[in-house]
Image (spheres, helix red, strand yellow):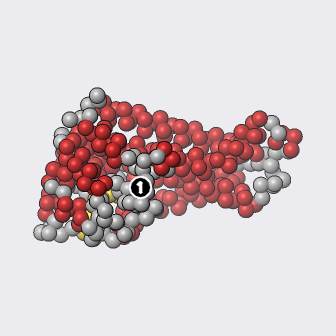
Amino acid sequence: MQNVYEQIDANKRKSAVLIILFILFIGAFGYFFAYQYGNDWTYLVYALGFSFFGSFSSFYFSDKIALSLSGAHESDSVKHSTFESITKTIAKSAGVQSPKTYIIPSQAMNAFATGRDPKHGAIAITQGLLDKLDRTELEGVIAHEISHIRNYDTRLMTIVAILVGTIAIVMDWSFRSGIGSSKKRSSGKAGSILAIIGVLLIILAPIIANLIKLAISRRREFFADAQATKITRQPSGLITALQKISSSKANLETASPATAHMYISNPLKNRKAGNFMAKMFSTHPPVQERIKALKGQL
């Protein structure tokens, strides 16, 4: 049974492995794509630049975009004093600047963190979460979100999004220009093993890239859970919070597939999390697995 420090180290290693695999995959995709088009890197370079600037703009304004889409408003120092005081205390314990606090006017139970770095961090929780969790449970949830901010998870996922977006743009432009372009390798070489691997990789690239992106997202959730308990030293708070959140039937109307990965628990209640394929395409690990890992720290 791993303690919290061993879990954090394990999560760091697994996250690093996933990121390295992703970079190697993008490199292989770029090589085979250029090979198929006569070593022409034009598509890849333009797509990378286009994706970078688009994602950079989104990243820079990510907090405003996310808060606006969720319908969140700034917390009131009187009505939401508990939320604000816990956030300040947890931030101090975590050694980061206290993030701005927001309330989402919904009876659903959920929360998310945003901001490009700890100096621009923000945490939004639903009114339902504030009403239904006790102080210890709130501390667990807020510590989880502050861990995301401290770990620069928003920045990491932006970089991942740039790489995934590059693949999507390259594929779109190449199909629009025609796969049978004159820049492509001759038919004699197209029959080689290398060419066949390249074609398969190019066809499967968008799916593989998204699967790796989702795997990184799920691993960051485990990491934030482990770090949250290191901050609060009370795994039971986050455990019972996750149990209550997952059992809640209320839907978060402002959530969408584009923002679901940000929340502490998948807000799209109609998604099944039991079978293998559902897990592969999920932004979050199953709550039962997260709780099992947290119980190992008790």
Q: Residue furthest top?
A: 1
Spot occupied by residue 294 in the image (x, y as percentages of width and height): 27, 39
Residue at x-position 42% and y-position 47%: 274
* Secondary-structure class at tag 1: helix
Nearer to me, 98 or 7: 7
Q: Quadrant of residue 86?
A: bottom left
Judge whether residue 196 can be spotted in this image: yes
Residue 113 in view, yes or no: no
Could you say where residue 199 lies in the image, as x and y percent from the top left? 73, 45
Q: Is residue 183 left or right of residue 47?
A: right
Quadrant of image for the C terminus: top left
Q: Is residue 171 above or below residue 95?
A: below
Q: Identify the residue at image location x=55%, y=41%.
A: 23
Q: Position of residue 122 (x, y in %)?
A: 29, 59
Residue at the (65%, 55%) spot, across then down: 170
Coordinates of residue 147 in the picture (x, y in percent): 29, 47
Identify whether 52 is placed above or below 4: below
Q: Residue furthest right?
A: 188
Quadrant in which the N terminus is drawn = top left
In this picture, residue 170 sits left or right of residue 262: right
Given the image, on which type of amino acid does mark 1 rest? His
- Left of 212 or right of it: where is 155? left
Q: Which residue is mark 1?
A: 261
Question: Position of 134 compared to 170: left or right?
Answer: left
Residue at x-position 32% and y-position 34%: 7
